[in-house]
Amino acid sequence: MKTLFIEHHGKFLSILAVVAFVITLIQYGFYVGNEVIQILQKFIVAIFILFILYQFGRIKYAENRVEYIKSRWIDLLLLILILIHTFLFIFFPTIYSGFAGVFQILDLNFFYIVVIQIYILISLIIKASREIHIIAEYRIQPAKVFLLSFLFMILVGTGFLMLPKSSFHRISFLDALFTSTSAVCVTGLIVVDTATHFTRLGQLIILGLIQIGGLGVMTITTFIAIFFAGGLGIKERVLISDFIEEEKLGKIKSTLTQIILFTLIIETIGAILFYHGLKNVNMPFGEKVFHSVFHSISAFCNAGFSTFSNNLMEDYLRNNFITVSTVGTLIILGGLGFGTLSNLFQLSRIVFKKRIQRVPILSTQSKIVLITTFILIILGAILTYAFERNNTLKNLSVEEIILTSIFQSITTRTAGFNTLPISEIMIATSLVYIFLMFIGASPGGTGGGIKTTTAFISGLAIIEFLKGRNKLEIFKRKIPIEIIHRVYVKIAFSFLLLFLALLILTITENFPFIDLLFEVISAFGTVGLSRGITFELSDFGKIVIATIMYIGRVGPITLLTSFTKETVQPKYEYPTEYVSTV
């Protein structure tokens, strides 16, 4: 029995996982009768019993029970919670009904089944995260893993959005694919109205895709694997180090912890502030909470998705200082990148402890990111006011003009929320926004574009060229030639991609060129703003824009790297010969 259990426990749990997933999918994704639901619930209870037996069997037949429990402490915790949950349900139904009442659930059996499904789902996610070592064993290039992880999530999201209960009206595969791509790639371009087309389930799916897309599939998976699934080996740590840009393998755990904690804390504070901004809006409590959480996550992940049909153009949002400033701040924090956020956090601790003279304050990258971000926000706000003061801003008060100009400058670069009617802005304003969208967010951030550091280094190179210097130095640091080379490869490849996309769209679509250019750059920068043509794109046009969104999120350099092969650099150099570029 022991040998049989040890040899086949993996297959047993996999079968259990598939059955549980299919049952949950049918129950919550499809419209089925009460009789079918009752049958499905009986299957869930059976799976629940088998799940408990499985966990006890793993503990009983483990070679070293103490070590197994230490490495699988979350499994044991879930098992204890399940047993307590069952004990209360059977012997103390009054207490149990009190818990159910908090969630306004009258049917205790239904509540019991739901909680069981949550337990099983958590266990299966933890189990899946342990399989990250399989990727490391195959030695797949990190860039390819990154690309495939996003592609996998897009396809999964497409399937979920096509479930009958995800939308009020039937959605086509292409529209579901476009929406899923936009959510995972944190863009915000939509071909169907998020507020009216999708049910609450569909909106929750979109929210989940935004959160996963903002953090990265591998980041979330690795975090779960480290903290709840027994940790990672050397190969897995080497693999994930490329994704989170952490060279020291020993710091991967702390870096991941910071990323997750920063995200949860910032999004929680953002949701509270957004909710406070809605205090005078006539809306049920549950609705306010959902809208607040949705917009906080969407803003920090720079997604631009909104559960309001008019985005932030609603009367009670557009000039609401609390909601607009909250969203704007979240966009900035998400766009700065986790490396810069971590650096700022360290700085705040240093200042608080008054040890500023003993520790370096900001890294060169953080300085570049902060300076470039500040300049772009101010520049965008000034130009927005200059070009729109007699157009879309003319009926606003001075305070509203300042708020709108600054917010639109912030959101245009990465997020895609809008408090101005983008389809009505001047051509000059559109060109400014195209410039901002092309630059995008910062390295390690949740936005796309060529990144602020790329824009800064390329601008610095022009200045140094005008000075007659052939090297780049900033803040008493020299920029390596490899970085400069990467910058211009990224810019050149980005222009090539955008040119090809525009060439195709000018053939397949019948819109003004400025609208197409705006749409393509918005997709590439994963911004989500549009001059009003997204809903009217042809099927082929949707495919082109979705592809650009995907490339914009994973990054042009990552895409190029996935096609490269590891080569040994030669130890010799050919003679230098001058080639004219004048």
Image (tube, rainbow, N blue to C red):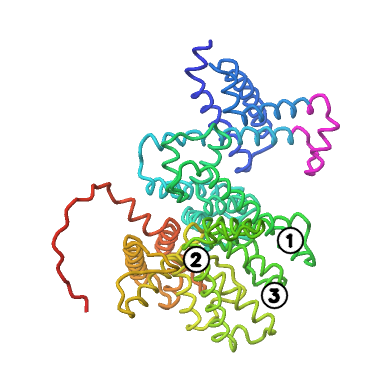
Magenta segment includes 106? yes
In primary-sequence order, the first of circles 1 and 3 is 1
* Residue at the image position 80 percent from the left and 38 percent from the top: 99
Q: Nearer the viewer, residue 116 or 380?
A: 380
Q: Residue at x 63, y 69 (%)?
A: 310
Callout 1: helix, strand or loop? helix
Q: Give the secondary structure at mark 2.
A: helix
Identify the amino acid type marked 1.
Tyr
Q: Residues within 10 Å of mark 2 (few under 14, many from 20)?
A: many
Residue corresponding to mark 1: 275
> Main SS type for the magenta part?
helix
Q: Are marks 2 and 3 in contact (CB under 8 Å)?
A: no
Q: Quadrant of residue 480?
A: bottom left
Q: Position of residue 212 (x, y in %)?
A: 54, 50
- Mark 1 or mark 2: whose residue is earlier in sequence: 1
* Residue on which the image places disc 2: 369
Mark 3 = which residue? 319
Q: Extreme right residue here?
A: 94
Contact between marks 1 and 3 (CB within 8 A): the answer is no
